[in-house]
Image (tube, grey):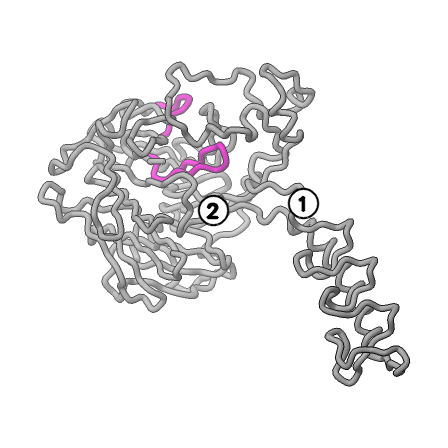
């Protein structure tokens, strides 16, 4: 998934560069129209939908619009290129309700896990009171007369007791001394009765959506299907899109034996919130489906040294904190939801404009240093452990200002080398394995094509491998 910034489009391509889906009208349209997106700087797949941050085009960057043009929207589009959710308004700048000023990134933060609110209240209150009070009082107070012929030691009873009454089955095969009517097994949350089977068999979906109908019904149906819920579902496309140029390569919308649009019936559009990097307003906001701001930074933090200056990204970490690329302050911040700065990363004081930051599985932090044209990895103590510079080729421009560096699950690194008009994937030896865009030619390698990336890109700002969430927030 590539955000081809000044070509005004977001697209999905195969590993060989064939474009299989795109959203946007290209580099020559700047008037609001269906499928228009101007200067997209970030995109991610959310289920079978695509979340896009459209910042607009700055002045003095694209010759066709020397004064620039404003977009200022975060949009969620379906596979048929319909906008089904939006925050911000086209052409309007501001910081009030439903207004943005140069949104450069949007990250979907799911409500998860969906099972926990159902499973935990059922399992824990039922299991714990039943197992422990029944077993322990029985074992501990017993005294065993010799006529029972008990073994010298029993694993279930305290050391001072060396036997048990026959009517209780205490031993290694029945952990914690539970009576037979309760099934005691650590794999099922410490002695859950059989009628509770948590959490595996509860109807929870990994993408956070609840569907109206069971999967089997759609697998057995033949389109067109008369669905009684269609009339009540406002999000069903009445005219399903038929691609006149089907691509033979499998793309992320082809889900064999899975729910497929337009059959999916969701209770809500978003089962989560959207974390928006609102660069022009120097803030990070988190909004829900109703467009209510539920959290923001700086928020309550009024410390002058903790304020943001042109932030470029925000990622929700597994520990609940938020990692922010504070671009013009030349640093990355890890902040808690109480608006307190917990850590600061500057690559030991060498970091320039920080365009992106992500937390790696090993605990290190990967920083995109646009000023110094490099991707740099630092450890927990902010010491540099790895770096890659993107302007060493003699055909490169002097300042390509890379905008994204993402570590992949196989250890490779995917780089949006912005003003070199290319996306590259380097392996762990820093050799370029994959290349998207025209060959380097001192900045003249700008191009645009509807079918392939290999005939040109124009300042690609973001690139992701769909389904690989190493270091970034999993939608």
Asked if 79 appears above or below 355 in the picture, the reply is above
Which quarter of the figure has residue 204? top right
Label 2 Cα neighbours within 10 Å, binned few <14 / some 14-19 / many ≥20: some
- In the rendering, which numbered label is found on residue 217? none
Q: Quadrant of the image for the N terminus?
A: top left
Instruction: Judge whether residue 23 can be spotted in this image.
Output: no
Label 1 or label 2, whichever comes before in sequence order: 1
The residue at the far left in this view is 394
- Residue 474's mark? 2
Residue to which mark 1 is pinned: 201
In this view, the residue in front, 106 or 57, is: 106
Residue 49 included in the magenta stretch of the image: yes
User: Which residue is painted at 48% across and 52% down in the image?
Assistant: 296
The mark lying in front, picked from 1 and 2, is 1
Q: Is residue 395 above or below residue 13?
A: below
Residue 394 location in percent, x, y? Answer: 9, 44
Q: Alpha carbon of mark 1 to alpha carbon of mark 2: how far? A: 23 Å
Nearest the viewer among 436 and 416 is 436
Of residues 221 and 108, the one drawn nearer to the viewer in this rendering: 221
Looking at the image, which residue is at 34% across and 69% down? 381
Read off the magenta span.
Answer: 31-52
For image coordinates 80% across by 58% down, the residue present is: 182
Residue at image position (40%, 45%) is 278
């Amino acid at each position: 998934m590539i955000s081809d910034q000044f070509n005004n489009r977001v697209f999905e391509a195969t590993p060989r560069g064939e474009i299989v889906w795109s959203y946007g009208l290209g580099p020559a349209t700047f008037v609001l129209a269906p499928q228009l997106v101007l200067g997209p700087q970030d995109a991610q797949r959310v289920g079978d939908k695509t979340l896009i941050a459209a910042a607009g085009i700055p002045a003095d960057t694209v010759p066709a619009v020397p004064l620039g043009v404003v977009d200022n929207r975060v949009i969620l589009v379906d596979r048929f290129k319909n906008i089904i959710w939006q925050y911000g308004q086209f052409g309007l700048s501001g910081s009030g309700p439903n207004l943005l000023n140069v949104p450069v990134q949007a990250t979907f933060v799911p409500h998860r896990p969906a099972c926990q609110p159902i499973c935990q209240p059922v399992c824990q209150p039922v299991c714990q009171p039943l197992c422990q009070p029944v077993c322990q009082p029985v074992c501990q107070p017993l005294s065993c007369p010799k006529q029972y012929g008990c073994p010298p030691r029993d694993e279930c009873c305290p050391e001072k007791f060396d036997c048990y009454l026959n009517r209780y089955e205490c031993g290694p095969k029945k952990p914690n001394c539970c009576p037979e009517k309760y099934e005691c097994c650590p794999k099922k949350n410490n002695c859950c009765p059989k009628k509770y089977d948590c959490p595996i068999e509860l109807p929870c979906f990994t993408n956070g959506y609840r569907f109206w109908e069971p999967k089997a019904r759609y697998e057995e149906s033949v389109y067109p299907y008369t669905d009684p819920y269609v009339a009540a579902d406002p999000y069903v496309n009445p005219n399903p899109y038929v691609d006149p140029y089907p691509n033979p390569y499998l793309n992320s919308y082809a889900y064999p034996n899975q729910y497929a649009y337009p059959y999916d019936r969701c209770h809500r559009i978003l089962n989560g919130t959207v974390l928006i990097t609102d660069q022009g307003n120097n803030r990070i906001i988190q909004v829900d489906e109703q467009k209510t701001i539920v959290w923001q930074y700086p928020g309550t933090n009024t410390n002058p040294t903790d304020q943001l200056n042109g932030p470029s990204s925000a990622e929700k970490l597994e520990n609940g904190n938020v990692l922010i690329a504070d671009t013009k302050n030349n640093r990355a911040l890890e902040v808690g939801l109480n608006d307190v700065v917990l850590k600061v990363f500057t690559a030991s004081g060498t970091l320039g404009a920080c365009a992106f930051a992500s937390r790696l599985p090993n605990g290190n932090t990967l920083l995109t240093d646009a000023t110094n044209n490099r991707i740099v990895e630092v450890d927990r103590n902010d010491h540099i452990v790895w770096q890659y510079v993107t302007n060493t080729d003699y055909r490169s421009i002097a300042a390509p200002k890379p905008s994204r560096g993402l570590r992949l699950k196989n250890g490779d690194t995917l780089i949006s080398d912005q003003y070199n008009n290319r996306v590259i994937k380097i392996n762990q030896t820093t050799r370029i394995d994959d290349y998207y865009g025209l060959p380097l030619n001192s900045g003249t390698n700008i191009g645009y094509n509807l079918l392939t990336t290999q005939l040109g890109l124009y300042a690609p700002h973001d690139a992701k491998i769909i389904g690989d969430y190493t270091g970034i927030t999993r939608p």
